Image: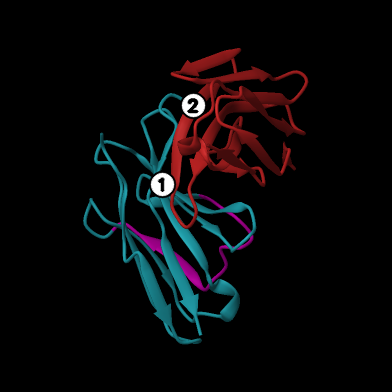
Chain colours: A cyan, B red
Amino acid sequence: EPEVTQTPSHQVTQMGQEVILRCVPISNHLYFYWYRQILGQKVEFLVSFYNNEISEKSEIFDDQFSVERPDGSNFTLKIRSTKLEDSAMYFCASSGTGKGANYGYTFGSGTRLTVV
Amino acid sequence: KQEVTQIPAALSVPEGENLVLNCSFTDSAIYNLQWFRQDPGKGLTSLLLIQSSQREQTSGRLNASLDKSSGRSTLYIAASQPGDSATYLCAVMNTGFQKLVFGTGTRLLVSP
């Protein structure tokens, strides 16, 4: 069964450093997403990406965050200057041709980001 | 603004019991609803997806129902097993949006 692959599984970074989280979505999916889950809290939407541009973003997704699909297979989330409160599990997801309606979401196994 | 609530927050049952997890949402203009399973420190595994026009979906021992007008969904797990122990998350997609709005989850423990 097709999978969404995320790397690395765990990243530790110093406050103020830039981090890039990487994802390989399912190849025939058209919508790509990033979510995060702070320990003990709900899974929260960050951003959705379609046709090489952001289609929706949350209040959390401020100027410190950016997304890119550099080569047609990878999908990345960059945090420019990390803060302690960015520590969370970050999930990448993709959905099929029907805006998520027909095929639902497939999530990756997540990247645990720890900012020290 | 869509709010999703799950009750109970935690549930502990002996193996073999049938159980029901509840999800409620405040805005009935949903496009679909999805149930996920999350194991500790792991990702989200999709269990069932219900379109807004559907009343229920079944997969093995799992059955999910949807009552859009009352803003409720239930996940029924038959003959529970210790391997079912996990957190179960409900998430809705509103019409006109792509994002999922998640509930806080129900942490299930099935003891042998």
- Label 1 residue SS: strand
| Residue at mark 2 to residue at mark 1: CA–CA distance | 16 Å
Callout 1: chain: A
- Tell me the residue that label 1 is attached to: A93
Q: Secondary structure at mark 2?
A: strand
> Who is closer to the viewer here, A23 or B73?
B73
The residues colored magenta run A56-69
Marks 2, 1: nearer the viewer: 2
The x and y percentages for residue A108 are 37, 49
**A103 lies above or below A2:** above
Question: Is B56 situated left or right of A100 in this image?
Answer: right
In the image, residue A10 sits, relative to residue B60, either above or below, namely below
Q: Badge 2: how crowded within 10 Å, few (<14), some, or many (20+)?
A: many
Q: Residues within 10 Å of mark 1 (few under 14, many from 20)?
A: many
Left/right of residue B79 with respect to residue A107 in the rendered view: right
A53 left or right, relative to A47: left
Q: Residue sitting at 26 percent across and 60 percent down?
A: A70
Q: Amino acid at mark 2?
A: Leu
> Within the magenta stretch, is there residue A59?
yes
Q: Are marks 2 and 1 in contact (CB under 8 Å)?
A: no
Residue A106's spot in the image, x, y percent?
39, 40
Q: Chain of mark 2?
A: B
Q: Quadrant of residue B35?
A: top right
Q: Position of residue B11 (x, y in %)?
A: 68, 39
Q: Which residue is mark 2?
A: B48
